[in-house]
Amino acid sequence: MPATDVKFGISRVAGALLESVETTDKIEKKELRGSDGNVARVHAYNPTSSFNVKGHGTLTIVPGFGASGITNLSNASLTLIEEVKKGEKNDDFDDWEYSGTGYATAQSV
């Protein structure tokens, strides 16, 4: 019987020359301590998802607001591509990398 609890390869980003895709879902918290010093109340807010994609070949992603190219990116009604790197070496293929943040409730201005 084939295993279905793990996957092999990249399925969250389209492209034939992808090296890796990493995402991190985060949330901020504010804690209120009671008179005994223990945490009595907690408020969770500002959910975000940071991402990093590496690959080779043609890249159409540019810094700024736009699509991350990642399907099922949690907490991402708005994505900001913060950094795009491109590399060339005389003994290897050209490569690129981009990273950014997905915001659940933000609007661009």
Image (spheres, rainbow, N blue to C red):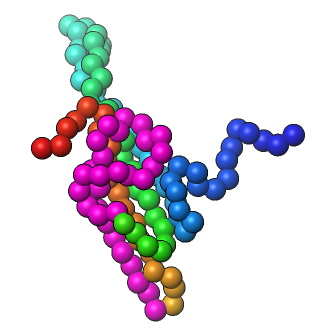
Quadrant into which the N terminus falls: top right
Quadrant of res 99: bottom left
Left or right: where does residue 22 sit relative to residue 108?
A: right
Residue 14 falls inside the magenta stretch: no
Residue beneath the point at 48% across and 45% down: 71
Residue 40 image offset from top left, x and y in percent: 28, 10
Left or right: where does residue 79 sit relative to residue 16?
A: left
Residue 73 falls inside the magenta stretch: yes
Residue beneath the point at 47% across and 40% down: 72
Q: Is residue 66 above or below residue 27?
A: below
Residue beneath the point at 38% across and 52% down: 68
Left or right: where does residue 17 sit relative to residue 47?
A: right
Q: Is residue 32 visible?
A: yes
Residue 48 image offset from top left, x and y in percent: 32, 38
Total residue callouts: 0
Query: Which contiguous range is marked in magenta?
Result: 61-90
The residue closer to the viewer here, 45 or 74, is 74
Residue 4 image offset from top left, x and y in percent: 74, 39
The residue closer to the viewer here, 93 or 107, is 107
Residue beneath the point at 18% across and 43% down: 108
- Check the image and name the residue furthest to the bottom: 90
